Image: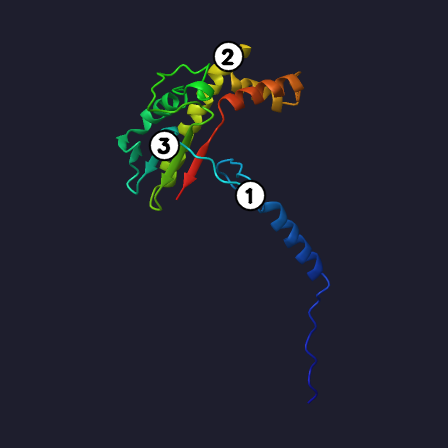
Amino acid sequence: MAKRAAPEVNAGSMADIAFLLLIFFLVTTTIETDTGLSRKLPPIDDQNVEPPVIKQKNIFTVLINKNDQLLVEDELMELKDLRKAAVEFLDNGGGTGDDACGYCKGKRDPKSSDNPDKAIISLKNERETSYSMYISVQNELVAAYNELRNRRAQELFGRPFHEMELAYDDSRSPEFKSEKLKEKIEKIKVEYPQKLSEVQ
């Protein structure tokens, strides 16, 4: 009895099927984008330059422990009070001479920061700190800077700082990338520089 030949499978359409599957996955796949905080890292340290001496009174320490409790300047504080405390510290203006601040409206306490240019907020958190608490604290600290910048921009230019930045970034704005607006924004940033140091 003669053996029958095995029937052949028509593989002519396999390339089409593979191509369709590839198209399907390309169309349906979404690539997650990272969300987080926009921070510009400091430039690489030049080994020959000695770090500047920072007075302890110009450092505002904020610690978040593993239980999400906030310790500000070695005292427990609620999150809702953090922004106000940071604004008071940054805007204190307790310096004299070259360190004096002519535009600060703070209490001018000699035990607190000299000048917004000298003031540094040091944020420290523990490994067990929750991400939501960390972000909340970051938001409050950045909001403190924004509050001061808005106030100063309103005094100098009659409009809030965030509106100036939006106008500068909006391509439909008549002030889009104008040099005058950029100078104004830079002036405010120089007067209230965001110096937020994070350590583990």
Residue at image point 37% right, 24% down: 89
Residue 78: quadrant of the picture? top left
Mark 2 to mark 3 CA distance (whole Å): 31 Å
Mark 3 to mark 1 CA distance (whole Å): 24 Å
Contact between labelled residues 1 and 2, with CB atoms less than 8 Å apart: no
Which residue is disc 3 drawn over? 56
Residue type at numbered disc 3: Gln
Specify whether 122 is left or right of 37: left
Q: Tell which circle, 2 or 1, labels the residue nearer the N-terminal end.
A: 1
Give the structural element (helix, strand or loop) at label 2: helix
Residue at image point 36% right, 29% down: 57
Which residue is disc 1 drawn over? 46
Residue at image point 47% right, 21% down: 98
The x and y percentages for residue 25 are: 61, 50
Residue type at numbered disc 2: Gln
Give the camera-side residue of 140 and 42.
42
Give the camera-side residue of 53 and 117.
53
47 is higher (above) or lower (below) than 138: below
Residue 108: quadrant of the picture? top left
For the N terminus, give its image quadrant. Answer: bottom right
For the C terminus, give its image quadrant. Answer: top left
Q: Tell which circle, 2 or 3, labels the residue nearer the N-terminal end.
A: 3
71 is higher (above) or lower (below) than 114: below
Give the camera-side residue of 29 and 15.
29
Query: Badge 3 local density, few (<14 within 10 Å), some, or many (20+)?
Result: few
The x and y percentages for residue 158 are: 53, 10
Residue at image point 36% right, 36% down: 133
Label number found at residue 116: none
